[in-house]
Image (cartoon, helix red, strand yellow):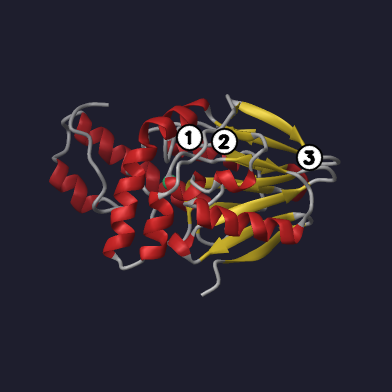
Amino acid sequence: MPDGRWVEIGDGVLARRHAELDLTTGLVLGADRALVVDTRGDARQGAELAAAVRAVTPLPPVVVVTHAHFDHCFGTAAFLPCPVFAHPRCRSTLAATAGGQRSEWTTYYRDRGDAITAEALAATDPPLPDRPVDPAVELDLGGRTVTLLHPGRGHTDHDVAVHVPDAAAVFAGDLVEQGAPPDLGDAVVADWPATLDVLLALQPAVVIPGHGDPVDTAFVEAQRATLAEVAALHAAVGAGRLDARAAERRSPLPGMPWPQRPC
Ligand SMILES: [Zn+2]
């Protein structure tokens, strides 16, 4: 199976769909620089993505990392030297968790019999982002300005999205997921719906999720409604108004983590 395929979103705006974890990365071309949105999950995958980007454009890259989960940022080394933008908490989270993520997911790939990915991941020491996005950075790519923004907490406490106004496109990272439920493992569920409101207020024609196919705002609104329902259940459990088991039964996202105390 090929490692990825490009999907054209607009003029010089591309999404790349990857079989591994159904990941979606991005590429935005200016006249002078090319913005790469996320870098895949290990050094080998990053090299594959960098080669695919070079096949599209000779422009020097700029990287933005949407968040510190390994599948979005462990491939960054293949693009260096170049600026690497992320929220400051992405940098600190990656510094604190890279080793743990590496061992957890190396085991995952070994257990699946994918020795190639397991070994590539085990040998990957992800570079830390060096340019802060807090809360927003306007980036001139040459004839096209994009905005990197932290719209609020949601999938993590440091998500960064990319707004490409002339293409009415938003790269949302894992704030939006298509093809699988949103992942709540490191989430700030109470804030997530309002964070999606910030992205919806940009009135994008297309939203590119961190996993899955590009979607429209109706999809994002539906995901927002689901997350708002979950947030309300979390709040009810946290306030002692609802038993966690009853909340679990009512939840539109069963199997989610529940707060142990009010939050
Ligand atoms: Zn994630």
Amino acid type at circle 1 is Ala
Please tell me whether mark 3 sits on a helix, a strand or a loop.
loop
In this figure, which residue is indicated by the disc labeled 2? Answer: 198
Quarter of the image for the C terminus: give it.
Answer: top left
Q: Residue reaching furthest bottom?
A: 1
- Label 2 – label 1 distance at C-alpha: 7 Å
Badge 1: how crowded within 10 Å, few (<14), some, or many (20+)? some
- Label 3 – label 2 distance at C-alpha: 23 Å
Q: Is residue 112 left or right of residue 198?
A: left
Tags 2 and 1 touching, CB below 8 Å: yes
Residue at the image position 84 percent from the left and 40 percent from the top? 142
In this figure, which residue is indicated by the disc labeled 3? Answer: 141
Q: Nearer the viewer, residue 203 or 114?
A: 114
Q: Nearer the viewer, residue 104 or 197?
A: 104
Q: Is residue 85 above or below residue 249?
A: above
Q: Please say whether residue 71 is visible from this viewpoint.
A: yes
Q: Is residue 56 left or right of residue 235?
A: right
